Image (tube, rainbow, N blue to C red):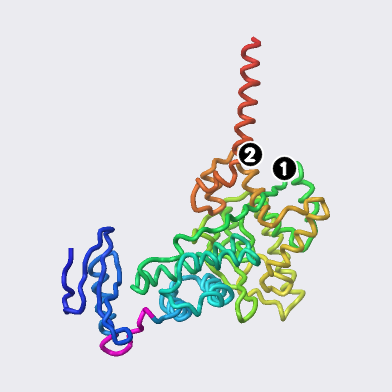
Amino acid sequence: MSKRASNGQGHIRQRPNGLWEGIYTVWVNGEKKQKSIYGKTSAEVREKLTAITRDIDTGEFVNPDKITLAEWAEFWQENFLNGIKKTTLTQYSDLLRLHILPALGHMRLQAITTPMIQKFYNSLLKKLSAKSIKNVHGVLRQCLDKAVVCGYLRHNPADACSLPKAAKHEMHVIESENIPMFLQAIRGSEYENLYFVALTTGMRQAEIIGLTWDCVDFSRGMIRVEKQLRKNHGRAGETYEFTSPKNGKIRILKPAPMVFDALKREKRKQAENALKFAPIYENKDNLVFTNEIGEHLCSVTVYSRLKRVLKGIGLEEVRFHDLRHTYATLSIENGDDLKTVSGNLGHATVAFTADVYAHVTDRMKENSADRMQAFLTGVIAK
């Protein structure tokens, strides 16, 4: 199927794979060459074709044969990433600046091949984890995907690359018999209430640090998890900013009453600090957990103090995130269904929760079999 564009500048046709192709003509080194752009509909391609031919007429057109990855990446960041979170934008920029552009930025966009990218990924194994390489790949792939859509590339050379498998962090939950020992160890510590909330709600560290009092409903016994306070590492140094929760999912928790007892203790502590450190005390963000003068907490400090406590009771392998795993494990073992646990954790799907905590459900199945065996034994004995 082929038809002329309405303004007569180039023509449009549908390819066998269903994509629409717009073909236009440019002069390259004194020679006339045909170039293509692609889209999902003829209207989309016609719009791109009109823009390109207009740029050719005004002299603003950039020949795709000459543009480098660095030039395209700059254009991509400035024009196609306006709708993403600031923290994500910073991460993309850092991965480009630190890894992708030093290795490939000087290359012509159309000269970059799959083997070239694969060799680049392999070289990163010497200094980056498999997960970090996957992040590098994600940014480069998105960048090149948009170049395909805009007609600068016929296909994405990053698509066929192989990535190293990321090793899963081993889960180190606090076993139920060790919970009393843990609670005793944090008693009286600076962040006792924070650690207790982490253990008994499954909230992520950034969600707890970013929890504000307007999201705590004492009368209804609910906590609204609608944001997190994330740390950024940018050129301007280390900063913190509020962002939406992971997966963008706002959730409502109905934790045990003892959680609200801990929050009330924290509220009293804040009132005491407001008097003790006046007039420098200022909790401008209305945070639930702050330092003595009302400033937000630093994630590194909260983590390092917890590790000190855990080491003191022989649980040095446990991380802060393992408090979340402990909460989920205890919930499942005590009869909460996977859908409820998944919702409380803010997971994207119940299937993801089932995969992460498969070992817990397997143990529960074994216990169920043991109970059934005991029942049958009793029945048969009669």
- Residue 350 in sight here: yes
- Is tag 2's residue or tag 1's residue first in the polypeptide sequence? 1
Q: Is residue 346 above or below residue 288?
A: above
- Spot the residue most to the right: 312
**Residue underneath mark 1:** 176
Which amino acid type is shown beneath numbered disc 1?
Answer: Ser
Q: Is residue 96 left or right of residue 174?
A: left
Which amino acid type is shown beneath numbered disc 2?
Answer: Glu
Quarter occupied by residue 112? bottom left
Q: Is residue 45 above or below residue 364?
A: below
Of residue 137 and residue 357, the one placed in the foreground of this image is 137
**Residue underneath mark 2:** 333
Of residue 361 and residue 167, the one placed in the foreground of this image is 167
Q: Position of residue 8 (x, y in %)?
A: 16, 78
Whole-Å distance between the Cαs marked 2 and 1? 10 Å
Please, what secondary structure does the residue beneath circle 2 have?
helix
- Check residue 282 in the rendering and tell me which mark sits there, or answer none: none
State the quadrant of the C terminus.
top right
Of residue 317 and residue 268, the one placed in the foreground of this image is 317
Magenta region includes residue 284: no
Magenta region includes residue 60: yes
What segment carries the magenta color?
Answer: 56-65
Residue drawn at point x = 41 percent, y = 81 percent: 67
- Spot the residue most to the top: 382
Q: Is residue 94 left or right of residue 63?
A: right
Q: Position of residue 271 (x, y in %)?
A: 71, 69
Do the numbered discs 2 and 1 sit on residues whose CB atoms are within 8 Å? yes
Residue drawn at point x = 63 percent, y = 20 percent: 375
Quarter occupied by residue 99? bottom right
Q: Main secondary structure of the magenta part?
A: loop
- Residue 212 in sight here: no
